[in-house]
Amino acid sequence: MHLGLRLFFGFLVITGLAAFFVMRVFVAEVKPSVREVMEDILVDTANLLAEDAADDLAAMPPGGDLRTSRFAQVVQAYAGRPVDAQIWGLDKRRLDLRIYVTDATGRVVLDAGAEQPRGNDGALGQDYSRWRDVALTLRGEYGARATREVKTDERSSVMYVAAPVRARDGGLLGVLTVAKAQSTVAPFVDRAERKILVAGAWLLGLSLLIGVAVTLWSVHSVRRLRRYAQQAGQDSAPGVRAVQPPALPGELGELARAMGAMRERLDGRAQREQFLRALTHELKGPLAAIRGAAELLEDPSLTEADRARFNGQIAEQTERLRELVDRLLALSKLESAAQPPRREPVALAPLTDQVLADHAAALQQRGLAVQWPQRDEAAVVDGDPAQLALALSNLLANAIDFAPAGSALVLSIGRLDGRVRWALRDHGPGVPDYALPHLGERFYATARPGSARKGSGLGLAIVRQVAALHGGTLAITPAAPGLQVELTLPSAPT
């Protein structure tokens, strides 16, 4: 299973459990709390009415009842009152309290109010001494009970709360009980339940949206790390800066930076090993030639012509070694730099004239002509003149080596979309297709025309590095015949 699905399902399970427990809390806590609040109000009501009924109950003759008493009239008046109350959006159109009074023996002497079980007199004359509300109150305890009218229906439950009716001297005269059906508060409970369910649904939906957002962000961050790791495992193109670790917050950012540091260490070690192998290979040829020529020069029978030839070979290979060392030092300096040592507006046309002047002898020796079909004098780049001259010099030297004697080199300088294009084409044999992607790698080179000798491959590597430092690119394409190199650099701001 994908990481995103695992994260989302985990978040869904957590959210679902939270919603389940919220509903459980409502069932286990909210509904009982409503009954507890209703019971608390009934306690206050029962004690208030018990005080009001005390005088009438004290004046009642033995075996009598309170049907004609002042208190009975008050209760009957209460039961007949019209009511139309708006309670937080719910209509209350009737009064719900049932009130009955028993004497000190538990006999009902008054049963009145809005909710009587039967007849006008209700339970008048019945013995309620066994009911918990009356029995406990007569014993001096708190008396209350909840009785279901329909045993299988919880909503038919009626709550009874009793209070003692006492004489002025403190003696117990009887018990007053106030009853209220729980169905009368059911609309309030149902409305609260609906609100909680709706709010819970919104909360669950928002939680899922947040879960999706967090999952997408986490997966996106992890995929960026994976993409970086995959790119880090591939060889970078010559002269191209290594891909940087993604900028991520928190622990993922620390992991990205740690991966970047690890990659730099591994790249550095791999590059050093590759460099040493390639350098050893490059040094073997000139050193072997120098050693062979030196051994032959020790032969006393060698003619002066042969001595001069071998001395020339030693000088040639020594110059080759010097050139190799100079280019290695230049490339190493470029690779260690984060940006050009200085920046200034540099016009490429005059800089190219200067480079051509430096190679005038080689051009004349090979009989090469330079053509300028396009020369934009206003093509100016922002960069280091010495590094740019080094890059152009290496490109021109390569073209001179591969161009047939007596042919032409085609130069062009132009501007397009805020960039300057410097191009050079020779009419030589070109390079095989398989070699094109590798041009610019250190120590990768093809044989010079008419010779088995190869260059070091450092010239194009230097050019690529200069281009990268200046925010440009180097492109090498077949020209049929020959090869064309294009150095593209950003134009200098005007």
Image (cartoon, helix red, strand yellow):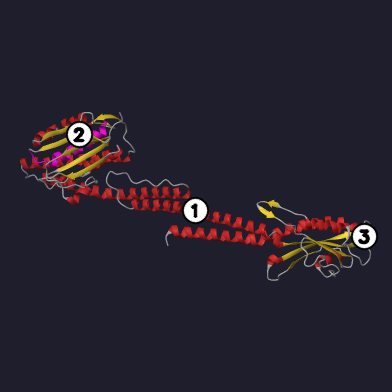
Q: Is residue 440 visible?
A: yes
Residue at horizontal 61 percent and vertical 55 percent from the top: 195
Question: Which quadrant of the figure has residue 456?
Answer: top left
Q: Name the secondary structure under disc 2.
A: strand
Quadrant location of residue 56?
bottom right
Q: Is residue 389 magenta?
A: yes
Q: Quadrant of the C terminus?
A: top left
First reached walking from the N terminus: tag 3 or tag 1:
3
Identify the disc placed on residue 239.
Answer: none
> Residue 385 in the image: x percent, y percent?
26, 31
* Above/below status of 259 relative to 380: below
Going by the numbered disc 3, the residue's amino acid type is: Ala
User: Badge 2, how many Cα within 10 Å: few under 14, some, many 20+?
Assistant: many
In this picture, residue 375 sits left or right of residue 34: left
Q: Earlier in the sequence, mark 2 or mark 3?
A: 3
Q: Between 398 and 434, which is closer to the camera in this rendering? A: 434
Magenta-highlighted residues: 385-405
The label number, if any, that marks residue 413 in the structure image: 2
Placement of 139 over or under 352, stated as above or below: below
**Considering the numbered disc 3 on the image, is that residue within a helix, a strand or a loop?**
helix
| Residue on which disc 1 sits | 209
